[in-house]
Image (spheres, rainbow, N blue to C red):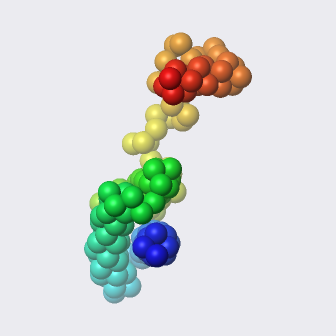
Amino acid sequence: MAGDSWLTDYDGCLLLGQELMEHINERSKHTRTSSAYTKISAQIRSKTRQFSADLNKLKQNLMRASASYHITQKEVERRQGMLDALITKEKQIEEATRNEGKPGGLFLTGATTETYSSGDPWGMSEEPDAFRDLSNTDLHQQQQHVIRGEST
């Protein structure tokens, strides 16, 4: 069944992404002029191309399965969420390889200040005022109200 192969392909792509991040971390332990650094960089470039190709194949296969109704809409949404996570990983890999000259692999350890401001690590300043003082129960009730409104 095509759906089963999609999940297998996804697992392979996910594993490749993890291997890439491990290689990037390993490379950061070596000096830029060492042969180990050069060897690992070549592996990273090769695996990055493979990761991108595998990711594109997953996207196309999901669109094909969705268009031919081989899987339910809920499964399409679930798999799209899985793809989104891989796309995020691809962006992290690209960012990490762009930052290869930065000492200590700061991007990979989360020690950069580019993603989050140091005064607001949870992004709470971006929260709309309407939600700021609501409890979890109140937010849940509001969500249920919106969901009921969409289904009618």
Residue at x-position 54% and y-position 35%: 121
Residue at x-position 42% and y-position 73%: 2
Tell me the quarter of the picture where residue 96 sits.
bottom left
Residue 143 rendering spot, x and y as whole percentages: 58, 25
Q: In the figure, 134 relative to 9: above or below?
A: above
Q: Say whether residue 59 is left or right of residue 81.
A: left
Residue 50 rendering spot, x and y as whole percentages: 32, 76
Tell me the quarter of the picture where residue 145 sits.
top right
Q: In the figure, 101 relative to 128: above or below?
A: below
Q: Say whether residue 136 is left or right of residue 26.
A: right
Residue 92 rendering spot, x and y as whole percentages: 39, 57
Residue 110 rendering spot, x and y as whole percentages: 50, 51
Residue at x-position 69% and y-position 25%: 136
Residue at x-position 55% and y-position 34%: 122
Q: Is residue 53 visible?
A: yes
Disc tally is 0
Q: In the figure, 30 relative to 100: above or below?
A: below
> Which sits in the foreground, 24 or 91?
91
> Which sits in the foreground, 51 or 118?
51
